[in-house]
Image: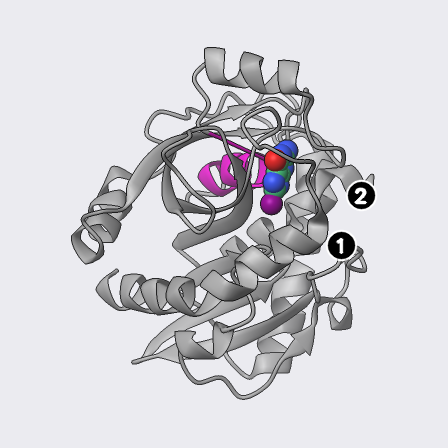
Amino acid sequence: MTIHPQTEIAMRHAEESASALAHLTGVARHDVAIILGSGWMSDADRLGPSQADFRVTDMPHFERPVAEGHPGSFRSVDADGKRVLVFLGRTHFYEGHGVDAVTHRVRTAAAAGCKVLILTNAAGGIREDWPVGTAVLIKDHINFTGVSPLHGADFVDLTDLYSPRLRKIARKIDPTLAEGVYMQFPGPMYETAAEITMAKTVGADLVGMSTALEAIVGRASGMEIMGLSLVTNYATGVAKHPHSHAEVLAAGKSAAGRMSDFLAQVIRKL
Ligand code: 8IG
């Protein structure tokens, strides 16, 4: 298959970013990449020692961060010899920079040598038995953004997109870990109650504004993928009151230590 010109550009940009990343961190190749979403960032130091934080905008081709609680930094963590590339925050589809901006971290991670990609997010929970603070392993997704992050006739297979091997590792560390289907909406508005009824009907357990587009490019780039959601609010209609971003940030902050400790264990077992 010939590579679509837009994919070629995205891959060249990723190579350029990866080369800047190696120069900034002094680490030529990384093994694992983690994208920390809201609710996952505040205790990132627990993942392992790192020299310093860098701004993604110190590399070419990265967009400036906009969402509150998304600093747009990254670090290289030494997890007992395993090199882990950690992005604090992501670029969202709703920022309007297009799918290549959304997936640029993923392509950069692949270009930097990463074979495993861990995607984390904060999400709205549809299931009443998952209170705020519940960590959920993503077992599959529904891409409801209406767009594809791939270009041209790139017929990528998405069977077992969220690696059964990695899910087994996660459940071994925490046998109580819930598993669910994540549905990515375009955002930035939260859903209506009717949309959540639809989401539930088509098999979603969680709703959010990220992750699915990134996972698709991760697969297309040959990486093994793990997805983790932290429920920071009940979805519309399930919730008894309106949503606020402050509430999401607070729920994330109180869970971040637990989430980082869990991720640290996962990394060491990969
Ligand atoms: I945090 O209820 C968080 N992100 N789409 N819906 C969507 N995204 C979210 C939600 C939610 N909560």
Image quarter where the C terminus lies is bottom left
Region of the chain picked out in magenta, as a range: 206-220
- Our reading of the magenta stretch's main secondary structure is helix
Going by the image, does 74 lie left or right of 269? right
Give the camera-side residue of 230 and 211.
230
Residue 245 in view of the camera? yes
Q: x and y percent of residue 34 in the render?
A: 48, 59
Quadrant for the N terminus, please: top right
Q: Residues within 10 Å of mark 1 (few under 14, many from 20)?
A: some
Q: Position of residue 245 (x, y in %)?
A: 70, 50
Q: Amino acid at mark 1?
A: Ala
Residue farthest along the front direction in this orientation: 240
Label total for image: 2
Please state if 112 lies on the left or on the right of 189 as rendered: left
* Relative height, residue 154 to residue 20 (above, below): above
Query: Is residue 75 placed above or below 104 in the rendered structure?
Result: below
Given the image, on which type of amino acid does mark 2 rest?
A: Glu
Say above or below: 158 vs 216.
Answer: above
Q: Residue at x 47, y 25 (%)?
A: 156
Mark 1 or mark 2: which comes first in sequence?
1
- In front here: 212 or 208? 208
Q: Which residue is mark 1?
A: 67
Label ID, residue 115 = none
- The answer to whether the residue labelled 1 contacts the one labelled 2, judged by CB atoms less than 8 Å apart, is yes
Element type where label 1 sits in the image: loop
- Residue at 62 percent across and 51 percent down: it is 248
User: For the residues marked 1 and 2, what is the alpha-carbon distance in whole angstroms?
Assistant: 9 Å
Q: Kindly state the secondary structure of the residue where label 2 is placed.
A: helix
Residue that mark 2 sits on: 95
